[in-house]
Image: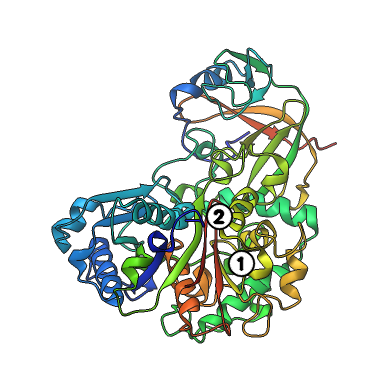
Amino acid sequence: MNRYLPTPSPNPPMDAVPFWDWCRKRELRFQQCGACGRHRHPPAPVCRFCGSDQVKWDPAPDEAELFSYTIVHNAVTEALKSYVPYNIAVVGFPSLQVRLISNIIDMPPSSLRIGMPLRLTWQECDDGTPLPLFLGEKS
Amino acid sequence: MGESKGAESRACIVGIGETDYTRRGGISDRSELALACAAVANAAKDAGLDVNDIDGLSSYANDESVPWLMQESLGLPKLRYATMAWGGGGGGCFAAIAQAAAAVESGAANYVAVFRSLCQGQRKRFGQGYGVPHSPGFLDPFGMFAPPFMLAPLAQRYKHDYGIREEQVAEIALSGRANAARNPRAVFKDRPLDLETYLSSRMVADPLRLYDCCQENDGACALVVTTEERARDLSGPVVRILAAGQGAEPGWGSGGLGSHNMPEEDYKAGGGRTLANRLYAKAGIGPEDVDTAQIYDHFTYFVLMNLESFGFCGRGEAGAYVADGNIRWSTGKLPINTSGGHLSEAYIHGLNLAVEGVRQIRGTSTSQVADAEICLLANSSSAAILGRV
């Protein structure tokens, strides 16, 4: 499949580097507090719930759902002109209480519904990093 | 602020100043710095002060008219206080007023100019994306480049969960445009808008249509903040700052411009609840006491959310509230954005809403609310309450 969007590769700050290291192994993992066990995203050096700086990287479950989304009609770069309209999805992982910004790559805009189930897939961006993207569980 | 301090040291606004407001690229013969200087000089003049009496500066949103450049241009020999509310967005607009108020009440400065200058024609357009990503790596690879794309999912969830209809949302745009028609400074003064045009306008980022999005403009404005004691030595009208503050909801973090991981009940509320309660308590008033409000209208849906957060109607009820005519000048209970707001006057990043709020308390708005005694300036992460002395 062609790339969903010709967008920049991730340029993570230090605290987010492990997230993308796991992505390079095609594993989606979220930060989990080593003390209280709660998950958090985006990555942060300290747990806002308990104050601990102990961190684990916990594999995301298979189940995700569409928490919210937008359909972008404005191309802000030349490269995007032939890609609009495209969707930006706020993907929720209810069991972890975290959300991830991503794209749903197999669904027309009119088929997106808040609450619909989503399944993880991967596409490499320019620097070869696999991006965590989603399929809309078409039957 | 608050009753614990004597009236003498309470903060108030004694001057307002503006440049002309134009569409993006409309000002090409003056720099952003030149506009900042002009706005501050106009505000000082309006207050009956010599600009060289200004000894404090307060801005926000990484304004590039930094204090040392302002001093090189304006003189400001007494400058002894300069501050900026953090962040690249307009969320700090009323925080800059709060910081000025804190400065004069503590004695750190006597006359603080709060200002914002913006020439989107001379720099990167906000609508095309920020220069500095808020959540590096987690937005750009997925095409989430510009504020409307970042904030549309909040509006989408709000619209979905509360069954908000586009005809209701339209009232924010239509009411603002009607107010702009009476305001000679409004960029869209002569551009009437009707419901049919709104509903048939193109989508920018679903559910945000073209007319749900604020303008991109060139211009600058400023306010002068001092104490009530010093204000009495000046000849002009005095507008008291009853309360001003900043701060997002617990767990908000970088919020809609970044993480999208704030608590679900806040995600579809745009934040602002805690801030509203804190400021009402400080001012000793409730939403029923507010005569007019200037609510940050970068995107229409967030005005609806803040009408709820600031207590004018229940959660999810703002669509019906505005459709019932409550925000319309002059017949509504709570006329809002009486200059036309960001959608129809100009987008000077929130501070022109404060200038309009001062006009309302002075009684000089072009859409004057009769006997306006209390004006709310509201954003999800900073707000202020203005009142008569």
Estimate the x, y position of residue B194 in percent, counting from the top left: 64, 81
Horizontal side, residue B335 vs residue B19: left or right: right
Question: Is B375 in front, or is B303?
Answer: B375
Q: Quadrant of residue A38?
A: top right
Which dot marks residue B202?
1
Measured as percent of width and height from the top left, residue A91 is found at 69, 36
Residue B24 makes an appearance in the image: no
Chain bearing tag 1 is B
Label 1 packing within 10 angstroms: few (<14), some (14-19), many (20+): some
The residue pinned by badge 2 equals B148
The residue sitting at 43% across, 45% down in the picture is: B87
Q: Amino acid at mark 1?
A: Arg
What residue lies at 67% left-to-right and 46% top-to-bottom? B267
Q: Secondary structure beneath disc 2?
A: helix
* Rendering quarter of residue B143: top right
Residue B349 % position (x, y): 44, 61
Amino acid type for the residue under numbered disc 2 = Pro
Disc 2 vs disc 1: which is toward the camera?
A: 2
**Structural distance between the alpha carbons of marks 2 and 1:** 14 Å
Q: Is residue B293 left or right of residue A105?
A: left
Residue occupying the point 24% across, 62% down: B54
Locate residue B143 relative to residue B349 in the image: left or right: right
Locate residue B203 relative to residue B353 in the image: left or right: right
Residue B119, x across and y down, in percent? 33, 63
Chain for disc number 2: B
